[in-house]
Structures are given as structure tokens and as C-alpha cells.
Image: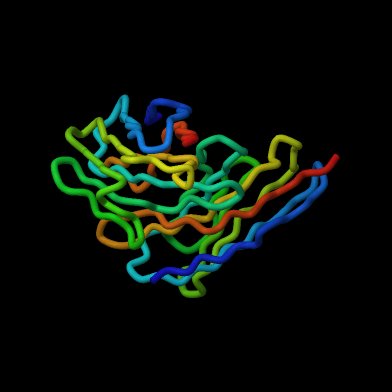
Amino acid sequence: GAVVSQHPSWVICKSGTSVKIECRSLDFQATTMFWYRQFPKQSLMLMATSNEGSKATYEQGVEKDKFLINHASLTLSTLTVTSAHPEDSSFYICSAREVRPEAFFGQGTRLTVV
Amino acid sequence: GQNIDQPTEMTATEGAIVQINCTYQTSGFNGLFWYQQHAGEAPTFLSYNVLDGLEEKGRFSSFLSRSKGYSYLLLKELQMKDSASYLCAVVSGSARQLTFGSGTQLTVLP
């Protein structure tokens, strides 16, 4: 089956710093990658959709300058949370899709901003 | 916009059968997924329906009625490990993005 690797699994950072999260499709080429955020006991909220080589499409209410997404290759997308604040603490999950409709999820990254 | 509704919580007994419903309103419908998510973990794929009818996979079955905007996930022979959140997700739009419902927290009691 398709495997999506997300790194790091958890990170603690100081307020005001930036954090980069990587999402890799290990055994398939991901034409589209999605980034989600999930707060405790809530569902996954789509933040942005990215296609390889083009700019990400952000959902309403998601600041593109704060959440930088780069999808430089068919196997790698990165999410950088810039100038992180405690309210950015959340569970961030990426998913990747090839031609099949099913999207495969990374393990998730638990971000804690102190 | 899109609207996906599913019950917030359900409780069932080990060995029983439980049905989790999902209703949706969306444009450009391209299929519906069910995912299972344990606390602190990423969602795992359970089923995908794009045509009307029932898809059976072991203890889990999923049903879709596109005309009614309705799906359900049926779990048979419940086990304690089935206690988790079950997410209904609709595929729509040209990007075929997934929009998730709020999830149904299922608790299986002994």
C-alpha cells in the first residue's frame, strides 16, 4: 500500500520561532497533497491543497503568509509555521494522493508552542 | 459550501452491531470515505463509496445513497479496539479535496 511519511512526529518550539513539517510519499508520486489541522476532540480542518510545482490553494481563514506550503517535487511537500504562537499548537496532518481517489495520511505532527 | 453531519457520540456493547450515519450536502460530489481515527493518531482508511449501494469489507460495511446525500458505516461483531472516532469525508471539487465531518466518537463497552 501507499505510504506517507510525516516528520517530525512532535515538536515543541518557542513562541515567535518557525517550524517546518515535511510530508513525503515514499512509494508513489503524489500529484496532490493536502494539509489539515486538528484541534483536540475536533475533526480535521483542511488548511490548503497543493499541487506539485504550483502555488498552494488555501482555505478561507488560513493565512498563507503564516502557513507556508511548498510542494517542490512529486514526493515532498513542506508546511512551515512561521512566527508560531501558542494558539498554533495543534495536530497537523498531511495527506497525499496519486490518481486513485483515496488519500493516504501521514502520521501527523503534534506541535506545541510555548 | 459543504455540510456534513454525523452524530457526535455513540456507545455500543462488545459483540453488537452499530450503524453510524452521515448526511451531506455538497456540489461536485466525487465519492465518500470513512476513516477511523484513534486518539493522537492519523486517520486510517476504512471504505470508499462512489456509486450507490453497499460495500462490504470484513466486519465493516459502508452504504451510499447519492440521491439522498446519505451514507452509513456498519460495524459488526464490535470489539473493544473499535472504540475510536469515525470520520465521514466527502470528495468534491476539481481538486477532489476531502472535507471531513466532525467525527463520531464510538465507545465500545464490555
Q: Residue at x 22, y 49 (%)?
A: A56
Give left or right: position of B42 versus A61. right
Number of numbered discs visible in the structure rendering: 0
When the figure is inspected, residue A10 is found, relative to residue B48, above or below; the finding is above
Q: Position of residue A77 (x, y in %)?
A: 27, 35
x and y, in percent, of residue B1 in the image = 38, 71
Q: Can see residue A3?
A: no
| Outermost residue to the right | B110
In this view of the protein, which residue sits in the foreground, B72 or A83?
A83
- Which residue is at 48% across, 47% downward? A87
Viewed as shown, does residue A62 lie left or right of B57? Answer: left
Q: Quadrant of the N terminus of chain A?
A: top left
Residue drawn at (37%, 30%) of the image: A4
| Residue A76 appears in the figure | yes
Q: Position of residue B69 (x, y in %)?
A: 49, 70
Please report the residue visible at 48 percent of the width from the left and 41 percent of the height from the top.
A89
Relative to B95, is B72 on the left or the right?
A: right
Q: Quarter of the image holding residue B20?
A: bottom right
> Which quadrant would residue A32 be assigned to in this image?
top left
